[in-house]
Image (cartoon, rainbow, N blue to C red):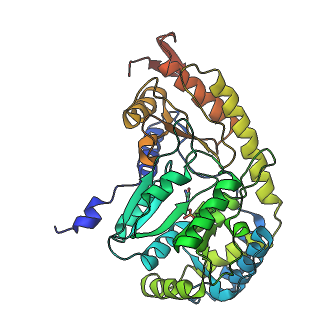
Amino acid sequence: MSISRLARSIEPSPTFALNEEARLLRERGEPVVNMGIGEPRNKAPITAILSSAARLSGGEIKYTPPDGLPSLKKAIIRYTEESYDRYVAPENVIVSAGAKQSLFNILFSILNPQDEVIVLAPHWVSYPEMIRMVYGIPVVIAPEDGTFQPRMQDIERATSSYTKAIIVNSPNNPSGAVYPPGFIAEIVDYCERKKIYLIMDDIYHKLVFDGKKAAPAYQFTDKNIEETMVITVNGVAKLYGMTGFRIGWAVANRKLVEVMSNVQAQTTSCTSVVLQSAAEGALTGMQSVVENLRLSFENNRNVIMQELSTFNGIKTIKPDGTFYCLPDFRAYSTNSVELAKFLLHRALVVTVPGKEFGMEGYLRLSFAGSVKDITTAIERIKWALDPSSPNEIYIGDRKMIRDWL
Ligand code: PMP
């Protein structure tokens, strides 16, 4: 069987792989706690359900324009106005199958082979793979030691004549870090001057804690939407906990949106009208759903920080947003893949190895689950790693024997 060199080189998504392993263990009756998954547990907002149900029962389930259902685009324009104080036209908006496809289509549309894209570690696992899929080169920048904060001088040093874009994700998956406004201002100014696209992956921008706010890049440019290098990506997955609806969008200059629409028209035609209707329902419905999610994640963040504070040896920087934290486990192991496997099999807890995010020795823990999940998981991890733990415990009626890493 012949498979292309490029396709063969694309890494499997580690999060999906671990989830699958956890699912199989659970199917065998193992009481696995999933701290790996990146999705809220809430039910979809009722306005999303009603809107898609109305579309279904009307029976008119047809193609939409490749760039999206006009009424959904209208709702996105209003969202952009309310969230970013930016007025954009329908020609500046394109709807895709999740923020993931928006990002892929942006990269496909702006990169020539061998062009470079700067990615700031810790980074979402898919960025480097997507860049490579369109024959680009990911240039990963490490954060300042002991922080999750990238430095402008490192970005400047990594820029070359091939640099086409920088991807910024704040609040950040996997660290939960929110970059300070001063940094966003600097990077916007830098990209505008150098004519480098600044791709703002704002998928978590409403999930920020302690009264803080994620500084929107648009705030720091006076260029209009046709001239700015800023592109924003958003979606309903994290905003409303609608991961399975697969609706995301990009806001950019109209030339780029036109090219992306052509790409979409020739690949997927459009995203499903039923799911676009659901997204429209969510965007035009009660927005208290977003605040409720945010509040529950802030509470969970406080619980996990409290639990982790009693865990000698690991260091955790308090996340300011998202539903992830990224503790430093190097005191126990510098091989995060081995450590995640050990914790899955020995403590029945799913975590995600930091290696996948450019942070070897760290583990990403999602606190999107219940408070009980969090306290149980941290208790089990402590048991598995602390040398003074009892040699055996019962998890339900399952006897667990302590083993060494
Ligand atoms: N960007 C980041 C940083 C994410 O964490 C995710 C989802 N895990 C996405 C994009 C993709 O979102 P969607 O589900 O809308 O494709």
Residue 49: x and y in percent read 72, 69
Q: Is residue 220 left or right of residue 137?
A: right
In the figure, 121 relative to 303: above or below? below
**The N terminus lies in which quarter of the figure?**
bottom left
In the figure, 270 relative to 295: above or below? below
Total of numbered circles in the picture? 0
The reply to whether residue 15 is visible in this rendering is yes
Q: Residue at x 61, y 28 (%)?
A: 376
Residue 294: x and y in percent read 75, 51
**The C terminus lies in which quarter of the figure?**
top left
Q: Residue at x 43, y 87 (%)?
A: 266
* Figure quarter occupied by ligand 1: bottom right
In the figure, 355 relative to 50: above or below? above
Q: Quadrant of residue 248?
A: bottom right
Residue 305: x and y in percent read 67, 32
Q: Nearer the viewer, residue 220 or 20?
A: 220
Q: Quadrant of residue 257?
A: bottom right
The reply to whether residue 241 is visible in this rendering is no
Q: Quadrant of residue 279?
A: bottom right
